[in-house]
Image (tube, grey):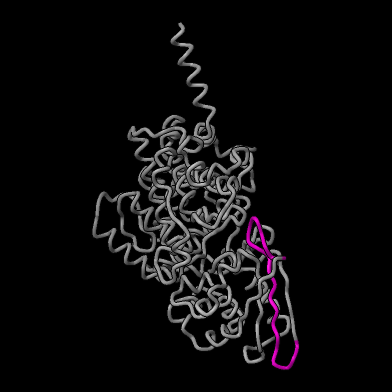
Amino acid sequence: MRKACENEATTTVKKKNIAWTLAENIVNTRYEALPKEAVQATKKSILDTLGVIAAASGIATECRLLVDFIKEAGGKEESTIIGFGHRVPAWMAAFANGAMGHCLDYDDLHYKAFVHPSSSVVSAGLAVAERVGNVHGKDFITAVALGDDLACRMGLSIHYKIDWLLTSVLGVFGATAASGKVLRLDERTMVNALSIALNEAAGTREMRYSLDNHLGGMRDGYPARGGVFSALLAKQGIKGPESCFDGKAGLFNVYFGGNFKPEVLTAHLGKQFEVAHVGIKAWPTCGNTHVYIDGTLRIITRQNLRPEDIDRITLFVGELAMYNCQPLEERRRPPSPIDAKYSIPFSVAIAAVKRRVAIGDVTMAAIKEQEVLEMAQKVGVIFDARFNSERGAPPGMVEIATKDGRVFSERLEVGYGHPSNPISEEDAIKKFLDCVSYSARPVPRNAAEKIVDTVMNLEKQQNVSSVVRLLS
């Protein structure tokens, strides 16, 4: 009798830790419990993620190198590499699709959590759904909503320093949650999956500081692959340390010096979903550039300015945005598309010259266009502490001086696409249709429109794999 009581007490203590609390929520949450806004936001993010993956398949040369490598390795034909149609083991399909999901830096973003959740979560969940087969749209929406929610809550719970790359480090737990939900893991097995994922959590911002490297774009393949792998290992019976989050050498103590807020992870868990606060990007560039792109476009459109009218452009930036402005000469002449996307001065130059910033404006050929490079030389940067931001995309101001002596300025708190100024459904669909037009395998217009209709009504679909077939 005494031994039975001790065992019961031990179980109670175990279930008080963070991993158990999160696992219980993931396992027990049903589609019917999702708020309407969470369902709509999740479907929008799924559509957006599929689009940017398809676009990268035809544009990003580094992803083609990765896909060729994965195809050469071969393996069981379980899940599809979007844009190519090749079927490979689920975790490798997740790796390829996750890498393509962020390669254009056009994927969705939770500005306050500093996490791009869906590139890894959707890629992982979809790969597992194909492996399992006949996964209902309601179940897939629930899995993605839970995965996005977990990755974003984790980002919100920590005191962020600019060292770890949070999407890589935290995204693997969201991808694991989505994968485990699709696999219908029980609570104990879900705890194991999250614990195994600790061994997959990696990635620092060095890939952002070093110009002309592929990992800055491909990084989300790692958490996607790790999430699928962790969930499948747990299903196989592999056990992990259940104190993976709050243990002595758990994630929060080792990676973040114990500086985190556990209440942020669990407040209104299962009732409020952070996916509802994820922004769909209007431009294929780093989120920190968007205020400045938006401000530039507003000025030149309102004043009908032509490139030859502009004498100089001055950007007023805070501490976080300054990382995307220095060293200034390198930022004015980015050596690769991914570097162009992370350069505020160069993104502004594109907007000033072309009155847009589109996928075709940040290809290797486009970033060498002389008119844009000349405009970038006119862009200067001034540090202004008014535009510092502890959380979220920082505010900013753009000032454009013309050759005839006029000066125009635009100060914005957020850019178009931020959850406070969300992209319209019409623009989100236009973005998707534009993205799939770049796919490595051409997607006919009627098929692309069918995908839009299918995803926006995903809760009615008996098998989410039908979306992949339309894309590949």
- With respect to residue 294, does 138 lie above or below? above
Quick one: 440 or 390, which is closer to the camera?
390
Q: Which residue does the image show at 48% across and 16% down from the upper left?
A: 8
Is 401 one of the magenta-colored residues?
yes
Q: Position of residue 247 (x, y in %)?
A: 48, 35
Q: Which residue does the image show at 64% across and 48% down from the upper left?
A: 37
Q: Is residue 255 visible?
A: yes
Q: Position of residue 265 (x, y in %)?
A: 59, 40
Is 254 one of the magenta-colored residues?
no
Q: Which residue does the image show at 51% across and 54% down from the upper left?
A: 46
Residue found at the far top of this picture: 1
Quick one: 443 or 255, which is closer to the camera?
255
- With respect to residue 248, does 327 lie above or below? below
**Image quadrant in which the C terminus is located:** bottom left
Q: Which residue does the image show at 51% across and 63% down from the upper left?
A: 449
Quick one: 165 or 161, which is closer to the camera?
161
**Image quadrant in which the N terminus is located:** top left
First to last magenta residue range: 386-406
Q: Position of residue 134 (x, y in %)?
A: 40, 43
